């Protein structure tokens, strides 16, 4: 006891750290990732490794060049890499995946100040950049279980097939036995992961429920098949893992509900009236941009607070 | 009624079954002239004077303050400047004890005839809130508004501390008598004794004692920190909200700590002012955690030795609880009126602060519904208008936001710094 440490209260320590939260997100993504390996084959593994590895690399290089503390230990770059991989078709050339990681980590995340400071979801933005830059490669989906063939049979995602004779059965959609980005097809595994995060109180279900719920109701009213609409495409991946991203969605429950509603509505509009078959990524990106405004309007009510005085002085 | 937010803490009430032990009168005491909120007192004695137990040794003309008494008999050996844990500089009287504990002639039961003489007697007792904040009791008991409910704060929501709990177990009748005394002197209709659910024995005892008295309600508070915070306890026991800029009295309530009300009752019977207090001594550097009653002015070091603390290993010493207590910079600092606990730890939180990830945990736990993450951002860019809109002035520094922050951001501290940016009207 040469010197006593003096610091402001509280002195009690809590053991939930950023790293634990990121680790839990990784755990929650594993079932869907495992399903992807099962359906789309072993190429999923090196593709994921490339995404994660390049994300960590870019994070490290960026922080070093900007003379900031090294943050690869917080695992957020791993989460970004993993979610990015989940958003890619399993056939994507590796170098394109590296470009995706560059966009996610360097442009979207680090240039805006790093973890928690980015205005848009890194993985979503990378997916959109890749989709616009390499539309052919980004839509080269594989039929499940055809991965042993050297030239994998490309297939459409189930979305454009909705209402046609080729529509995929609900069960296949729920289990993920359909074409699509590697991590988005297995609704069951994504649901398990999402519920795990909710049970660990890492995410709130407000945004996923209002997202999926509003899309369901709008599809129902407009007499498209609502169950098909929520199971097909990237809705579950987007709702549970990207519309719940801390940095780019509102903090309050009210705000999260508004965010989810917005995502549902925009997804519906793009799918129904737009030229893209899928609208989840754009809806989340658009709502990311609106987040600061939603947050302004959905602040908590402070106990006993007086209304702000309009004319001061 | 919607419950206010709170956090689950490990209670660590290791000393709840430790009966109070009296610490022997130390050979020397040092008594600061500022131990309560408000103006510091001026010494009434000089170096070389002899003093007796219960003798007033410091007082002030300022209304918002409380006088200081000696808990020992002996000789004043020094009067020096002293900087307390709040950073306030005041005089400190050092008394070498003679071991006789001669009681002063001043100590006699006060004569109380009406409310005015009651409030005056309360002031003479030197009483202040014994729960830790140290609000002068005579100010609290002389409200300007009409009061219909007296709330007795027996939440003791901080981990480790059991000083109030032992009062409830050891002197329950003093508490009930004290409640009835305050009620009748101030003409308050009903009282609520609010106890946190983690003290079932106290709840049972008082429920039985108050069974035939409809003017005293026993309230069980949920076990979620911070139940003992004034606004929280008022809301959770009466449903009333203390508005921004008003006092509890404006909502018709007075909140008193449970040990304070028992002390006041004993003072009215004996005339012995506030010169001793019970405190919990615990923490992982303490070999034998105890509840100790000692005279005010005893040095922390002697108490830690008494409880077999491994003094060389202590890295952090806290006066009060781990959530709102003050870091003690010097182990020789004395016990003051508000010392409800002394916690000694052989480690401290060395984690680095990292970026806010906007997880919203701080917003979820704030009992008042503040948004510490947004305040943190507004503070960083010194946006005073935004800070005002975010109502940072209402933060009571309970520390819940800092506690839950996964990035280890010192949000509660930032709130206090942000308050200082806002000009007072």
Image (cartoon, helix red, strand yellow):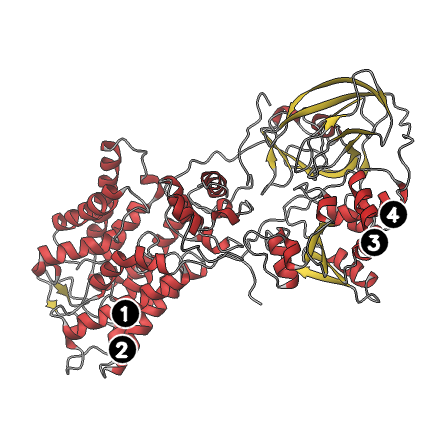
Q: Is residue B129 left or right of residue A129?
A: right
Residue A135 in view here: yes
| Residue found farthest to the front | A313
- Depth check: give the residue in front, A55 or B3: B3
Q: Secondary structure at mark 4?
A: loop
**In the picture shown, does residue B35 fall above or below B110?**
above
Residue B53 % position (x, y): 86, 30
Disc 4 and disc 2 on one polypeptide chain: no
> How dense is the environment of label 4, judged by Cα within 10 Å: few (below 14), some, or many (20 and up)?
some
Disc 4 and disc 1 on one polypeptide chain: no
Disc 3 and disc 1 on one polypeptide chain: no
**In the picture shown, does residue B311 fall above or below A80?**
above
Q: Residue at x 63, y 46 (%)?
A: B158
**Residues at marks 2 and 1 touching, judged by CB atoms closer than 8 Å:** yes
Query: Of circles 3 and 1, which is in front?
Result: 3
Query: Of circles 4 and 3, which is in front?
Result: 4
**Residues at marks 4 and 2 touching, judged by CB atoms closer than 8 Å:** no
Query: Of circles 3 and 2, which is in front?
Result: 3
The label shown at residue A218 is 2
Chain to which the residue tagged by mark 2 belongs: A
**In the picture shown, does residue A61 fall above or below A237?**
above
Residue A48 % position (x, y): 23, 51
Name the residue beneath numbered marker 3: B181
**In the picture shown, does residue A133 fall above or below A272?**
above
């Amino acid at each position: 006891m040469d010197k006593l440490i003096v610091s402001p209260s509280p002195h009690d320590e809590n053991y939930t750290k950023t790293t634990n939260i990121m680790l839990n997100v990784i755990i929650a993504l594993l079932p869907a990732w495992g399903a992807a390996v099962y359906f789309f084959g072993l190429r999923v593994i090196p593709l994921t490794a490339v995404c994660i590895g390049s994300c960590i690399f870019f994070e490290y290089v960026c922080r070093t060049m900007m003379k900031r503390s090294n943050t690869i230990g917080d695992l957020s770059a791993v989460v970004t890499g993993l979610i990015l991989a989940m958003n890619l078709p399993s056939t994507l050339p590796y170098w394109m995946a590296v470009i995706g990681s560059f966009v996610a980590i360097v442009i979207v995340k680090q240039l805006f100040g790093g973890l928690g400071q980015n205005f848009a979801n890194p993985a979503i933005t990378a997916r959109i950049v890749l989709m616009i830059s390499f539309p052919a490669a980004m839509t080269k989906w594989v039929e499940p279980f055809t991965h042993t063939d050297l030239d994998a049979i490309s297939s459409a995602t189930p979305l454009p097939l909705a209402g046609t004779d080729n529509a995929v059965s609900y069960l296949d959609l729920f289990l993920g036995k359909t074409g699509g980005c590697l991590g988005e097809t297995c609704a069951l595994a994504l649901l398990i992961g999402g519920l795990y995060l909710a049970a660990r109180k890492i995410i709130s279900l407000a945004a996923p429920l209002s997202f999926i719920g509003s899309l369901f109701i709008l599809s129902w009213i407009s007499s498209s098949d609502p169950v098909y609409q929520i199971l097909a495409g990237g809705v579950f991946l987007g709702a549970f893992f990207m519309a719940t991203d801390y940095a780019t969605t509102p903090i309050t429950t009210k705000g999260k509900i508004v965010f989810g509603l917005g995502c549902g509505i925009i997804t519906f509009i793009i799918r129904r009236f737009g030229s893209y078959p899928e609208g989840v990524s754009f809806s989340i990106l658009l709502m990311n941009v609106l987040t600061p405004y939603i947050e302004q309007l959905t602040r908590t009510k402070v106990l006993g607070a007086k209304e702000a005085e309009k004319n001061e002085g | 009624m919607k419950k206010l937010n709170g956090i689950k803490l490990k209670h660590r009430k290791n000393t709840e079954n430790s009966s109070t032990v009296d610490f022997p009168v130390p050979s020397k005491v040092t008594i600061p002239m500022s131990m309560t909120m408000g103006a510091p007192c001026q010494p009434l004695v000089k170096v070389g004077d002899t003093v007796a137990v219960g003798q007033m040794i410091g007082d002030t003309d300022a209304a918002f303050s409380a006088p200081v008494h000696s808990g020992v008999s002996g000789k004043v050996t020094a009067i020096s400047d002293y900087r307390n844990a709040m950073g306030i500089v005041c005089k400190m009287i050092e008394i070498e004890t003679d071991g006789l504990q001669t009681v002063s002639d001043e100590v006699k039961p006060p004569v109380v005839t009406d409310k005015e003489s009651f409030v005056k007697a309360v002031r003479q007792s030197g009483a202040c809130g014994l729960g830790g904040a140290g609000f002068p009791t005579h100010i609290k008991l002389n409200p300007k508004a009409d009061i219909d409910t007296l709330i007795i704060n027996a939440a003791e929501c901080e981990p480790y501390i059991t000083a109030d709990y032992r009062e409830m177990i050891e002197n329950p009748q003093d508490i009930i008598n004290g409640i009835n005394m305050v009620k009748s002197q101030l003409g308050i209709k009903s009282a609520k004794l609010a106890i946190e659910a983690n003290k079932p024995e106290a709840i049972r005892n008082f429920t039985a004692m108050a069974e035939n008295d409809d003017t005293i309600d026993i309230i069980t508070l949920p076990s979620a920190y911070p139940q003992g915070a004034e606004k929280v306890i008022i809301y959770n026991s009466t449903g009333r909200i203390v508005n921004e800029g008003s006092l509890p009295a404006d909502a018709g309530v007075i909140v008193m700590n449970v040990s304070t009300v028992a002390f006041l009752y004993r003072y009215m019977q004996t005339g012995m002012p506030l010169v001793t207090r019970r405190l919990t001594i615990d923490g992982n550097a303490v070999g034998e955690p105890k509840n100790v009653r000692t005279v005010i002015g005893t040095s922390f070091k002697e108490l830690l030795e008494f409880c077999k603390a491994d003094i060389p290993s202590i890295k952090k010493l806290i006066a009060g609880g781990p959530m709102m207590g003050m870091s003690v910079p010097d182990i020789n600092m004395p016990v003051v009126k508000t010392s409800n606990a002394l916690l000694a730890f052989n480690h401290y939180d060395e984690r680095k602060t990292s970026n806010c990830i906007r997880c919203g945990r701080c917003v979820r736990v704030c009992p008042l519904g503040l948004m510490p993450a947004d305040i943190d951002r507004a503070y960083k860019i010194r946006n005073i208008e935004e800070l005002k809109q975010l109502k940072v002035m209402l933060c009571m520094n309970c520390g819940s936001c800092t506690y839950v922050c996964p990035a280890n951001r010192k949000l509660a501290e930032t709130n206090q710094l942000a308050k200082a940016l806002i000009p007072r009207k």
